[in-house]
Amino acid sequence: MAKTFANNDVSAYTQLIDNTTVNHSVYSQSSDDTTITQPSNVRSSDQEMILNEKDENNGENNDENNDSVTTQGNDEKTEKINSQIQKLKEQLQDALDKNQFEKALEISNKIKELEQKLKTLNQNNNMELQIAELKAKAINYLQNGQLDEAINTITKILKLQHSKDDYKILGKLYHEAKKDKNPHVFVNGNELQSDVNPVIQNGKTYIPLRAVANAIGVDNKAINWDEHSQAVSIKTGNINIYMPINTTQIIVNGQTKTIDAPAVETNGRVMVPLRAISQLFGENVDWYQEGEIVTVGD
């Protein structure tokens, strides 16, 4: 059983690396947080296993080819930028020798721009290499049936690159590992840490307001709780929110809005329905039913 499970997930993950579509991992969300429709063109587990060693080898070769093309393209860009910088440095020296200081300043600024591009390119190259190494590790862990290690590795990938495909794979692994009893909330690729777990009430997913606000950059000083009016207020930058609990009527930047379910208080924390986050902070919110994953801002 363990071997079959590992082979299925390795095949799926190898497909994702090859930028192909894993049909059984694609979900569409309805208006209800907990109602997800699965498409009809779903592969059976037997079809997944048909990939076998040949397909896995092809996936590995394709991945190597893709990495080679990417590396070659980046190397060419790096070489071109270095060549441009060298020519500009020669022009800079010539302008200085001729006391053409205005021209020298212009050339110097161009050199700075190119050096910044070079720095950014090198950073991107390093990130791509890190992601490739982590994906190789994840596949190796899956082949060996090391589920927890694979999960931890994919969460590291998500911190570097917020890929919907990787969220789908992570959700599948959460489900297989029976780690989907409570929703997992990710904000810009990082899993939300809070002393209160997300919960599902009346078919709605609720997440802790303060923890999410902190994760997207709202300082604690900007968040206040009014015990008398039983409402939370957030004032920071261009955001001004007034949200009483137990009512769907809130005020955002002076305008009254209606959210689909009221905020509630749980264990001393204000919890808000998942879909309200978009209305409150203008952040994109996605829900992956397999694995119970919520993403904010990705």
Image (cartoon, grey):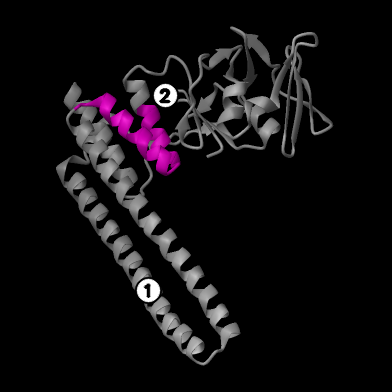
Q: CA distance from mark 2 to mark 1?
A: 46 Å
Q: Position of residue 251 (x, y in %)?
A: 80, 26
Where is the N terminus found, in terms of image quarters? top left
Magenta-colored span: 145-172
Q: Where is 16 relative to 143, above or below?
A: below
Q: Where is 151 relative to 125, above or below?
A: above
Q: Is residue 30 visible?
A: no
The residue carrying mark 2 is 291
Q: Which residue is at 80% across, 34% downward?
A: 253
Whether tag 2 and tag 1 are in contact, CB under 8 A, the answer is: no
Residue 169 among those drawn in magenta: yes
Q: Which residue is at 74% across, 39% downward?
A: 238
Q: Quadrant of residue 88?
A: bottom left
Q: Which residue is at 29% across, 48% downward?
A: 132
Earlier in the chain: of badge 2 and badge 1, it is 1
Considering depth in this image, is 264 or 8 the residue closer to the camera? 264
